[in-house]
Amino acid sequence: MSAKVRLKKLEQLLLDGPWRNESALSVETLLDVLVCLYTECSHSALRRDKYVAEFLEWAPDALGNLVLSVLTSVMLDKHASKQDC
C-alpha cells in the first residue's frame, strides 16, 4: 500500500471518528497518546537517543498547535450548533 493510500485511509478514519468506525480512535485519544509519549520520553534515559531527542524538540510546538486546532474546531462546532437552534 502506497503512502498516499495509507494517508487517505488515516484521514478517513479520523474524519469518520469512533462513532462511525469502532476501530477508529478519536482525535482526543491520539492527542492523549502523544502527550503521554512525550512525558514518558522526557523523564527517561531515552532522551539520549537521537530520534527521541528530535521528537522531544518537535513535540511542544506541534502538540500546542494540534491542541489549539482541536479546541478551535470544537468551539466553532459549538457556535454553529447554537446558531442552528
Image (cartoon, helix red, strand yellow):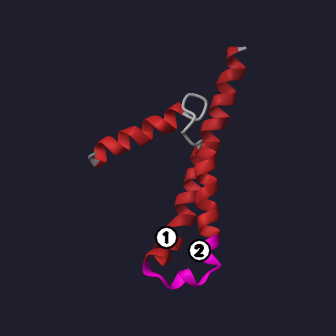
Q: From the viewer's perspective, is residue 83 above or below residue 65?
A: above
Q: Which residue is mark 1?
A: 55
Left or right: 12 as drawn, with respect to 37: left
Q: Which range is magenta?
A: 40-50
Indicate the position of residue 4 as horizontal and vertical percent values: 29, 44
Mark 2 and 1 residues: CB-CB less than 8 Å, in contact? yes
Q: Residue at x 49, y 70 (%)?
A: 55
Q: Residue at x 43, y 42 (%)?
A: 10
Q: Residue 24 — which label? A: none
Depth check: give the residue in front, 62 or 9: 9
Q: From the viewer's perspective, is residue 14 above or below residue 46?
A: above
What is the three-letter code of the residue carrying label 1?
A: Phe
* Secondary structure state at the residue bearing disc 2: helix
Magenta region includes residue 46: yes
Q: Which residue is mark 2?
A: 41
Q: From the viewer's perspective, is residue 46 above or below residue 28?
A: below
Name the quadrant containing residue 74: top right
Depth check: give the residue in front, 45 or 55: 45
